[in-house]
Image (tube, coloured by chain):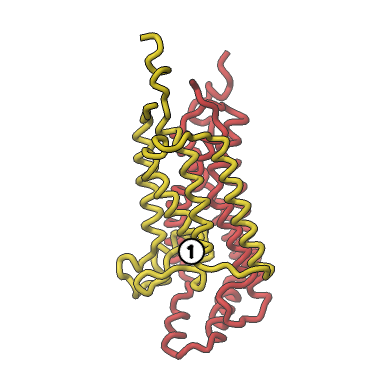
Amino acid sequence: MESEYEESGSDSYWASVIFGALVIGLIMSIMGLLSQYITISNEPTGASFGIGQAIGTLACLVGAIGGILSTRHYANNVDDTFTIGKGALIGFLTGVVGVLLSTIVTFIWLYIVDTGLTQTFYEWQIANVEAQNLPDAQMEMAISFIPDPNSTSAIMMQVGIGLVVVGILNAISGMIGTKIFAKDED
Amino acid sequence: MSIKAQQLGMYFLLMALSLVVFVIALGPGLFNSAAVSILSWQHDAFHLLCHQSADRSYFIGGVKMAVCSRCIGIYSAFLLGVLIMPLIPRFFFVINRKILQLIIVAIVINFLDVLGNGIGIWTNTLHSRFFLGAFFGLSLALILTSEFFKQINIKEKDYGK
């Protein structure tokens, strides 16, 4: 008897994609926002790597394992004999949807819940650069490198490129997940 | 014993993707784009994946790479592992269970390195972070070896002829 998953064809992997994307998307958003709150709660000392950034780093580990999470879900709940190509596709889609979810959650937080956070964080970064006591020319250059929070095009550019790279990395982690969780057909 | 190559299309896709990620991770310095050092699209590409802290990153041509030293270790060693994948089964007997254990060991060592450095037990360096990252990246590539290049016992292959 054919399973309900087989009947639904290519749609059958979307539950796994959504599962993996929800996990990485929410964690990337929460860790990213938490990192900003912790950063601005401390005095800018000029240090380039603090607790806030360290927490942000943990989010990076999560961002690349979406493919492993979703292929595990697929192997456990749908079909455990899928190809590495399908695993790559599931991983890629997980990365893309995960970044979109993360962007939406972050936007909702920054534009509805706490509208002042972006500007406060921007000002904190400038104060932190000023605390480094750099020569004027270097300081101006360093400040010019801090992304302007009011530039929508800069944000969209970041999200667009992030989609591609996180998608590729999750495609690779999807291949690895397939190797770990799927059974060989022969 | 001989080597059977399979799913070569997927193997070359993996190679291309790994190469693309590695080249982007090297940052704008690779192309002498010093003027856009931090606002480059390469840095944008990894802003969700790496802290990109200057004092924890290598520089090319005076420009910070798009990822930290640990991450560039992961990406470069993974690419190296993918490139040498056809040779690995000629010299080693690939056992996936053992490689999985190797991956877990690599994760634990990297985690302990971050923890030990964070609470001040030791101070890691650019190079130590690079090599620990490389250990993880290489072990990730190794687990895919048997998917593309299988070791076949000739006697078994010829069985029934």
Quadrant location of the C terminus of chain B in the rendered image: top left
Q: Quadrant of residue B153?
A: top left
* Quarter of the picture holding the N terminus of chain B: top left
Q: Amino acid at mark 1?
A: Ser
Q: Position of residue B80 (x, y in %)?
A: 40, 49
> Observer-nearest residue: A83 or A92?
A83
Q: Nearer the viewer, residue A119 or B24?
A: B24
Q: Secondary structure at mark 1?
A: helix
Residue A19, position as x, y percentages in the image: 60, 41
Image position of A26 (left or right of B6): right
Rendered shade, chain A: red
According to the picture, the residue beneath numbered tag 1 turns out to be B69
Nearer to the camera, B96 or A129: B96
Residue drawn at point x = 37 percent, y = 38 percent: B86
Badge 1: residue crowd in 10 Å (few <14, some 14–19, many ≥20):
many
Which chain can be seen in yellow?
B
Residue B11 visible, this angle: yes
Q: Which residue is located at x 48 percent, y 75 percent? A: A146
Chain for disc number 1: B
Relative height, residue B11 to residue A117 (above, below)? above
State whether residue A18 appears in this view.
no
Residue A28 coordinates in the image, percent (x, y):
59, 56
Marker count (numbered): 1
* B44 is higher (above) or lower (below) than B137: below
Q: Nearer the viewer, residue A131 or B102?
A: B102
